[in-house]
Image: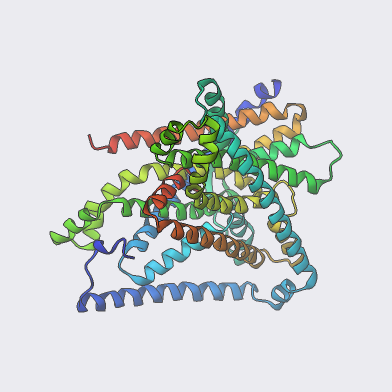
Amino acid sequence: MADATVLYDAPGPATIRRQRVYSAIFLVVVAAVLVWIVLKLEDAGEFDSRVWNGLTRSNVISALQDGLLATFKAAVISIVLAVVLGFMLAVGRLSDHRWIRLPFWAVIEFLRAVPVLLMMLLVLKLTGGHDIDPDTRGLIAVVVGLTLYNGSVLAEVFRAGVQAVPKGQVEAAYAIGLRKNQVMTVVLLPQAVRFMLPAIISQCVVALKDTSLGYIVLYPETVRQGKLIAQFLQNNLMVFVVIAVLFIIMNNLLSELASWLERRLSRRGRASKAAAAVEEVLPAG
Amino acid sequence: MQWLSTNWTDILKYFGVTVEMSILAGLIALVVGTILAAMRVGPVPLGRVVGGLYIRLVRNTPLLVVMLIFAFGLPELNFRPSLPLASWFGSESHYELIYFNFFWTSATIALGLYTASFVCEAIRSGINAVPLGQAEAARAIGMTFAQSLRLVVLPQAFRVVVPPLASTYIAMVKNTSVAFGVGVAEAAFEMHKLSNDFSSQVLPIFIVFAVGYMILVAIVSAVSSLIERKLAVS
């Protein structure tokens, strides 16, 4: 909280007492809401052994495992492909020639503005009637949609990362006689990667969350499997809360990784500032 | 292109639903997000904890799961909010003008509460971007926490906050499409329906809807740069 302490004085004895009262009132309100929720849940039979014993049944567990595996599969393939696509788009976007730069700019802006779900629905339709089994069709739809969207986002991340490298580096590289692609591969990229890593991992969280849209294109990932389990146990609330907790755990681990990397970077002030600048090109949400 | 001439009123109507969802969810997100941001920078320790917990939980849950909890989970607790949905475009009858729809309401509330966590982080980063000297000066002339926040820090923070807030709202407009997954008939639903009905026209249909979303995104950007120019100091 060091960042906002200027907003109020270090509390004196009277203020501490007053704040304790506020905290106590707040605590009572929060506790009351929690108790009300628990009572309400109990009332609706959400704590029934039918639900919770059901969740530990082996067929339910293995259905969840299948779903998690499918989620990871889609997420990993999409992220790897998105990094490749993003790199290619960024190279085109950074071109010195206007006639190359403009079409790449248009493609990136188009992909960034269209909802991922629309792309997935398009791919689902386009793969129809080709005698592909529905699970594979769903996987293709999810992977293509996520790759196109995250590729366009990562393209902007790469561009910002390359542009965050101090200009003197490029000038020095040209001065010692390196060619354009050598400047990129030998001087710019190795430095830019350091700035880009936290942003790339943040985008992995987004990609992992967006695999849940596989639910709509009938890809049997975690949420779709959760829906099956919910129908099987005849309970929606607790099953979806469990699914949410699974995602929260996975994403928190990824976020921890990102902030660990950021802490490592922040030992060098300039690098962390550059990394923060790169993260600003990420869309929110 | 016959599908376009016979269906364009429907397309406008369902984009109307998307717009209405965006406006209502945007208002919910702004109110809840601002309260959360005030809690997170405020002097009450428990408020900071609760605010931080909300962000950590909601940000890391997929929007679709939040919507599923609201649309299918909460009805088990007899929580079924239902708000009127006005259908402005292409309605031939009076019945369509305003109707109450539970799925529309719950998806919109879910979207608003989800987006609130991103709004909160945008506002908080804006507050942190205001130079420390400003808050120090406000404290030095004897303003309380509420006064210095309201009169000195927040007016300056809002200026910094506009671009990240616009980015949040652009993402939210696109996220309305997820509501299709819990049975809300909005633009993505209409695209799916049309591409089922005219399966040889899948690509042109996609492009029309993509352009529709791009127009909405462009409107948000235009409004944000207008506000930015209004707030800019000389």
Looking at the picture, does residue B199 appear above or below residue A230?
above
Q: Position of residue B151 (x, y in %)?
A: 22, 52
Q: Nearer the viewer, residue A96 or A168?
A: A168
Which residue in the rendered view is the most extreme toward the front?
A: A176
Residue A7 lies left or right of residue A32; in this view the side is left
Which residue is located at x 55 percent, y 24 percent? A100
Place of residue A251 in the rendered image (x, y in percent of width and height, measured from the top left): 57, 60
Which residue is at 44% across, 60% downward?
A263
Q: Is residue A38 left or right of residue B1?
A: left
Residue drawn where x is 75% and y is 54% of the image: A220
- Identify the image quadrant of residue B17: top right
- Residue A196 spot, x, y in % from top left: 50, 47
- Number of numbered discs: 0
- Residue found farthest to the left: B141
Q: Position of residue B102 (x, y in %)?
A: 59, 52
- The coloring applied to the image is rainbow
Mark yes or no: residue A104 visible: yes
- As drawn, the residue found furthest toward the right would be A131
Which of the two residues, B84 or B159, is positioned nearer the viewer here? Answer: B159
Q: With respect to residue B185, does B92 lie above or below?
A: above
Q: Nearer the viewer, residue A282 or A270?
A: A270
| Residue A283 seen anywhere in this rendered image of the structure | no
- On-image quarter of the N terminus of chain A: bottom left
